[in-house]
Amino acid sequence: MKKHNSLSRILIVASKKSLSIHSSFFQIIGCIFFVMALISCEKEPEPIGIADEQVINTYYTDTISIQVKLFQSDSINTTSRTGNSRLLMGSLTDEYVGSYSAQAFGNLSLTSLTEELKNDDGQVAIFDSLVGFFQTDYFYGDTTVQNMIQFYEVSEYFEGKFYYQFDSLQTSNSVVGTASYPAALDSNRVLRVAFSEEFGRKLFDYGVANKFENDSLFRIFSKGLAFRSASPNTSIIGINPLAPVTGVGLYFHYPDDTVASSYKFDMPVSFSNIESDLSNSALAALATQDYIPSENTNNLAAIQAGTGIGVKVEFPYLNDFVSNQNIIIQRAELDIPALKPAMSASKSAPNQLLFLFGDGNGFYYTPSGSVQFLEAEGGANEGLSMAYSTAGKSYSYATMTSYINQLSKGNIPESDGLILQPSENNISVDRFIFPTQKNTDNLPSIRLRMYYSVVE
């Protein structure tokens, strides 16, 4: 598809891999719905009273119709990697996005290949214990109720591939360890787990018989751990599997030595499995449809990391508004106020919302197979984003003057709207709820604030 020069000034190209987006996520098929006409066109806007003679003929409107569509992705890459790593476990239910739960899987790997479990005198070590240390860095929901985490042995080999939130691995039926959150945290918020003697001796006996000298063979023998919550439906917690302190310690001593020794296993490969059930929620209609307008969800929209719930915003009457009145847009700002009753300190929103280009019922791909996202005003090769304020329970507005100008003139034929993507999409379940139309409580809703001049 032919590109326009004006478009290149407001786009940045990002690879699929860096955005952790799986191709099936964008193969969503649905119907396109449009809202009714533009209210602000019924009468001439009032001047906003700017003194400068060059902009004296400047007006303001925030009633441009915005079409909000909701969808749910099933392809979020949750594989841990350096700088973007967290394992989630637990479950929660709320009225807006239904029930969602998470479990995690991590392999066990040798950290060194020199431990023989024998001392210089040839004495074989004596098993003491197996203890897990897991650095927590996230909680969501009510942590005043203890979250009981249970550990199982993984019985399916970890493959060398990316894992997505719909992936899971088979496990044994027996619990090999338990820990209660937050009761089992130390002063550094490390979750300490005492594993069963049976599981500990299994690893220890392997080391005695085979030595810890071949990681590939060890990972076939002991495939890893599964992290699951047996708590009530109250919270989801997260651990960092790549933190320096995270690992499983095997403790032992030698017959003539009272000082304990240890060997550490780490988890270089791990991922979270996240499930979502939208029934009995405000978004229940999404359970049977792929891509729906917010009119079908009582004019409420949601964006949630982890579960793939997101929105696309379109401006179907923007072109008519601009061309019919011969308008020059001087400034355009997208404002998305939160539904404040839905937000709380324990159920926060994603740290940032990112803007990517949509096309039909999916994302816009370039011929090279990359995804495009909107550049922030002023260039600097930075993507446009909205930062969330926990104090104000709201996002900063997004200035998108260049984009709105180009879209209103039909200069972006490759895209028909913007998809809002939550930050930390693969390592949290943070969610944001907002109205798409003013309701009976007259709460503020999503709006496009525009300052514009009418050319005589």
Image: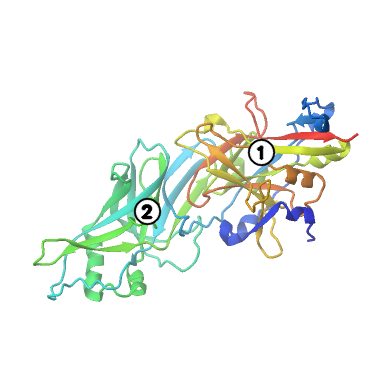
In the picture, the disc for residue 227 is: 2
Nearer the observer, 180 or 100: 180
In the picture, the disc for residue 21 is: none
Would you call the spot at circle 1 few (<14 residues within 10 Å), some (14-19), or many (20 or more)? many
Return the x and y of residue 32 as percentages of the image width and height.
Answer: 74, 46
Q: Is residue 299 visible?
A: yes
Decide which of tag 1 and tag 2 comes sooner along the chain.
Answer: 2
Q: Quadrant of residue 455?
A: top right
Nearer the observer, 55 or 92: 55
Q: Rounded to the nearest whole Å, what is the CA distance between mark 1 and mark 2? A: 36 Å
Mark 1, residue position: 294
Residue depicted at 84% across the width and 26% down the height: 43
The reply to whether discs 1 and 2 touch (Cβ–Cβ < 8 Å) is: no
**Which kind of residue does numbered mark 1 sit on?**
Ser
Nearer the observer, 449 or 6: 6
Task: Please give left or right for residue 326 compared with residue 18 in the image.
Answer: right
Task: Please give left or right for residue 392 compared with residue 233 in the image.
Answer: right
Task: Please give left or right for residue 168 compared with residue 134 in the image.
Answer: right
**Which kind of residue does numbered mark 2 sit on?**
Phe
- The quadrant of the picture occupied by the N terminus is bottom right
Return the x and y of residue 436 as percentages of the image width and height.
Answer: 66, 34
Residue depicted at 37% across the width and 64% down the height: 155
Residue depicted at 76% across the width and 30% down the height: 60
Nearer the observer, 398 or 143: 398
The single residue placed furthest to the right in the displayed view is 456
- The quadrant of the picture occupied by the C terminus is top right
